[in-house]
Amino acid sequence: MSHPDYPHEALADLPGVAFAPMRQIILAQAKASKLSVLEDDPNRLTVQTAHGLIGLRPGAEADTAGMVAAADLRWLFVLKSAVVAQMQHMMPQVAEAMRWSDGDAVGSLPPNFQFVRVTKVEDLGPVFLRVHLHGEDLSSHGDESIHFRLVQPPKDTEAEWPYIGDNGSLKWPTGPGAPHKPVYTTRAVDHKTNTLITDVFIHEGGRTTDWAREVQADHRARAVVGLVGPSGGGLLRANRVLMATDETGFPAAARLLENLPEGATGEIFLEAEHGADCAYPITAPPGVEVTWLARAKGDNLADATIAALPGAGDRAIWFAGEKGEARRVREVAKASGRDPGDLRISGFWSAPA
């Protein structure tokens, strides 16, 4: 089937992959993620995602081909990369052999990459910096995906940037010129001026912290960076919420809270070294209670979240923090009978081993 909302389509043969078992895998993933199945015939499968279509088709030189379709070429590339990544996890040899029918220029910059320039870095309380980025076209950065990779060139070395690999996926350089590429949250975007704002949590020894401070001190040589995205989950469409995060997720939490449906209720736990003294600006709707936790006093984000789960009822659960703590919250939430598809629990960083 063709879909008027997704005019850009690409196919890639999956050598040695039988249609029937791959169909079952995709249908199981669609069910777990609550995605709509638009077409399910003996030799065709089409599933709608937040960013376009994925599915299976008869192959040109193989029994089965992967299919993606999207509204524009940027999202088409994102879907292709996602399919290759999934195949890499299941069948690495097949993933490396994939070649897409639209023939993106191998070795060129990916369609979802662009250069942006820092126009301002300002202090935002004692533990955050606010970075303003200007690009040529930020139209794809909306509410459906609120994260991106902030691609920073190495210091004192010529930068190497991401490129399109033979199998159509995004490839990252690994040599001395490899950039630093952490994921950050779009705190706000002004499409009229093509300006994007992101907030950087200050932690000593952090490469992004050092980079932002250098640019703030007018070291303009590193003011041009790359932006890959958008990616990740979008806004939280829920009337009742239980949210929890440490500083690494404050920008995402702030954006989600500002865009909750009118009349939303619930609770959010915010953990910082000294609690509310971090002075990060977060405004919750009147019906959402804010509880600050202070690590210096022994408070723990995961403990507070787990203690609140029994009384959370049908609230949507959103958690962002250390990976081990996120795993602990996820396990308790799933053991309590919650549908994994209703949980948005993310590990934003890893504690030292």
Image: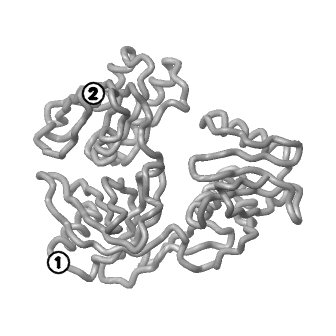
The mark that comes first in sequence, 1 or 2, is: 1
Q: Which residue is mark 2?
A: 288
Q: Which residue is mark 1?
A: 218
- Can you give x and y, in whole percent of width and height, for residue 326 in the image? 40, 36
Residue at left offset 46%, top offset 30%: 330
* Closer to the eye: label 1 or 2: 2
- Can you give x and y, in whole percent of width and height, for residue 238 in the image? 42, 31
Residue 68 figure quarter:
bottom right
How dense is the environment of label 2, judged by Cα within 10 Å: few (below 14), some, or many (20 and up)?
A: many
Q: Amino acid at mark 1?
A: Asp
Q: Nearer the viewer, residue 80 or 202?
A: 80
Q: Secondary structure at mark 2?
A: strand
Q: Horizontal placement of 95 versus 123: left or right?
A: right
Q: Is residue 169 above or below residue 258?
A: below
Colour basis: one colour
Residue 2 visible to the viewer? yes
Q: Is residue 154 above or below residue 73?
A: below
Residue at left offset 47%, top offset 76%: 161
Q: Horizontal placement of 189 versus 111: left or right?
A: left
- Can you give x and y, in whole percent of width and height, for residue 176 in the image? 42, 78
